[in-house]
Image (cartoon, rainbow, N blue to C red):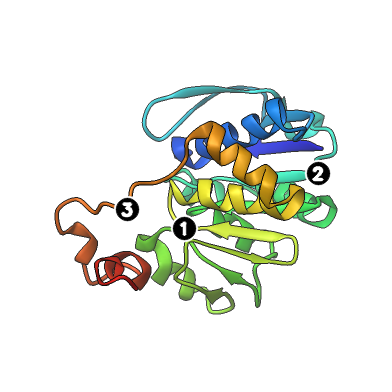
Amino acid sequence: MRFGFLIFDGVEELDLLGPWELVGVWAEYFDGPGERLLVAAQPGPVRCAKGLTLTADVGFADCPALDVLLVPGGRGTRRVVDEAETIAFISECASQCQALLSVCTGAFLLHRAGVLTGQPATTHWASLDRLRALGDVAVQETRFTHAGHIWTSAGVSAGMDMTLAFIADIAGERTAGEVQRWAEYYPDDRRYGDAHRADELPAYIKDFEDGE
């Protein structure tokens, strides 16, 4: 399996690096993908939203056929959504890949590529209304969605939950559990302060204290 990760200026770091880590654990210890690639419009350095610099392994023109593509989000998506070359690359991958995954506002790039029409999808809580406003997406206020070969997740850290679910779907619950154990990814249930009670948050966040 060849697993590609799209990167672009302004990409949100954890959208990318959380799934990259889990896929890397899967690859290194549990017979996961044989190759992982950072893919950008052009090979070379990319500046992330919080200042981290990454280096693309390949550009679109030289990218080999991918089995899976993950499209992260971040403020850079507001620019990239209008970049025809990137959208065409995502669209081509959608027609050829075994799976297409998005994290956070990466969902808007999938939509522009024409793969979310009539499909369930989610995104960062602050962009749910913007996703609804597109008018043709079955927006779900959940941690992640899965329909056919398309996966989407809510904001930032939610990409890790989606990635574990994807691994479970492809390689089985046991393998996903081993990846989870190795990465020690067992999120604490604690909510700090009262920010999680904000009206605009999805119910699965703000109703947590009631055990719902």
Q: Residue at x 61, y 38 (%)?
A: 179
Q: Which residue is mark 2?
A: 67
Dot 1 surroundings within 10 Å: few (below 14), some, or many (20 or more)?
many
How far apart marks 1 and 2 lie (CA) works out to 23 Å
- The image's mark for residue 154 is 1
- CB atoms of marks 1 and 2 within 8 Å: no
Q: Is residue 8 above or below residue 102?
A: above
Question: How far across and down, in percent of the image, does residue 114 sit?
Answer: 69, 65
Dot 2 surroundings within 10 Å: few (below 14), some, or many (20 or more)?
some
Question: How far across and down, in percent of the image, does residue 6 sit?
Answer: 63, 39
How far apart marks 2 and 3 lie (CA) works out to 34 Å
Which quadrant of the figure has residue 128?
Answer: bottom left
- CB atoms of marks 3 and 1 within 8 Å: no
Q: Amino acid at mark 1?
A: Ala
Q: Residue at x 44, y 71 (%)?
A: 141
Secondary element at tag 2? loop
Q: Is residue 88 above or below residue 152?
A: above
> Where is the N terminus found, in terms of image quarters?
top right
Q: Is residue 81 above or below residue 61?
A: below
Quick one: 124 or 55, which is closer to the camera? 124
> Where is the C terminus found, in terms of image quarters?
bottom left
Say which label, 3 or 1, has the lower sequence index: 1
Question: How far across and down, in percent of the image, does residue 149 sit?
Answer: 74, 60
